Image (cartoon, rainbow, N blue to C red):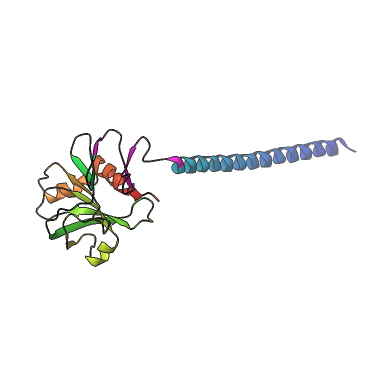
């Protein structure tokens, strides 16, 4: 075989080796990138699944009636049982929020107009409750109420509308009440609305979402 033939074969072989190396590196790079992306997705998914908005919170349970709710550990809390009445109160660290539980609640002042800002579910979504957010026109406080699901249809409650609704609504037919009102007197309707997006407002919604009855 001629020297040129040997030289051609050597060059040809070298080209093949370089091409295989390039293909192999490209394949490894794609695999490594894809694997790294999968690891990131798995990590992010795990972080999302393990994130607990109630981490470090405390829980109150009415041992007589089996209703429970959670509240931030730095909020003040009191509870009492007097005869037939069970009561519990928790207030935010700046004392701008008062959340109260009564079972049963016997006082009433009749129906009143109520402007609905949102209607939501408790965390498990399986119990017969709705979370009502809004305010009484002419009042100066923001309010959350736990209500029975049937009230939504019975009273025509719709978001962004004002309905003629019962004052101090109960969440069951035996008279249980779970309500929030802000302590500060807001100067405008917009301030009342803005409170729901504040830190106290968001924490208060989590309190209401945690409400449940033990099986």
Along the viewing direction, whichever of 134 and 212 lies nearer the viewer: 212
Q: Residue furthest right?
A: 1
Q: Is 116 contained in the magenta span?
A: no
Residue 109 screen position, x and y as percent: 11, 56
Is 117 above or below relative to 9?
below
| Between 55 and 129, the one nearer to me in the picture | 129
For the point 17% across and 44% down, the residue is 182
Q: Could you tell me residue 78's position as x and y percent? A: 23, 37
* Residue 137, quarter of picture: bottom left
- Residue visible at 28% across and 42% down? 203
Residue drawn at (33%, 54%), measured in percent from left and top? 121
Q: Could you say which is closer to the camera, residue 96 or residue 214?
A: 214
When asked about the image quadrant of residue 153, the answer is: bottom left
Q: Is residue 29 left or right of residue 188?
A: right
Whether residue 213 sits left or right of residue 85 in the image: it is right
Q: What residue span does the magenta drawing correspond to? A: 50-79
What is the x, y in percent for residue 26?
A: 63, 41
Would residue 114 appear left or right of 211 to someone viewing this image?
left
Q: Say which residue appears at 83% left-offset and 37% top-offset.
A: 4
Q: Nearer the viewer, residue 1 or 169?
A: 169
């Amino acid at each position: 075989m001629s020297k040129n033939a040997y030289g051609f074969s050597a060059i040809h072989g070298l080209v093949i080796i370089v091409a295989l190396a390039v293909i192999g590196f490209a394949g490894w790079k794609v695999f490594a990138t894809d694997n790294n992306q999968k690891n990131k997705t798995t990590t992010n998914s795990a972080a999302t699944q393990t994130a607990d908005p109630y981490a470090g919170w405390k829980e109150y349970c009415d041992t007589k009636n089996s209703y429970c709710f959670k509240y931030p550990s730095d909020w003040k809390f009191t509870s009492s049982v007097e005869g037939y009445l069970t009561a519990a109160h928790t207030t935010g660290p700046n004392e701008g929020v008062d959340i109260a539980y009564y079972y049963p609640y016997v006082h009433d002042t009749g129906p009143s107009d109520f402007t609905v800002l949102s209607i939501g579910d408790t965390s498990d979504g399986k119990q017969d409750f709705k979370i009502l957010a809004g305010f009484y026109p002419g009042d100066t406080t923001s309010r959350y109420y736990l209500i029975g699901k049937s009230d939504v249809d019975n009273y025509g409650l719709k978001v962004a509308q004002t309905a003629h609704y019962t004052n101090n609504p109960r969440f069951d037919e035996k008279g249980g009440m779970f309500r929030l009102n802000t302590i500060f007197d807001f100067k405008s309707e917009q301030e009342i609305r803005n409170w729901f997006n504040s830190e106290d407002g968001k924490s208060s919604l989590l309190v209401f979402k945690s409400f449940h009855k033990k099986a």
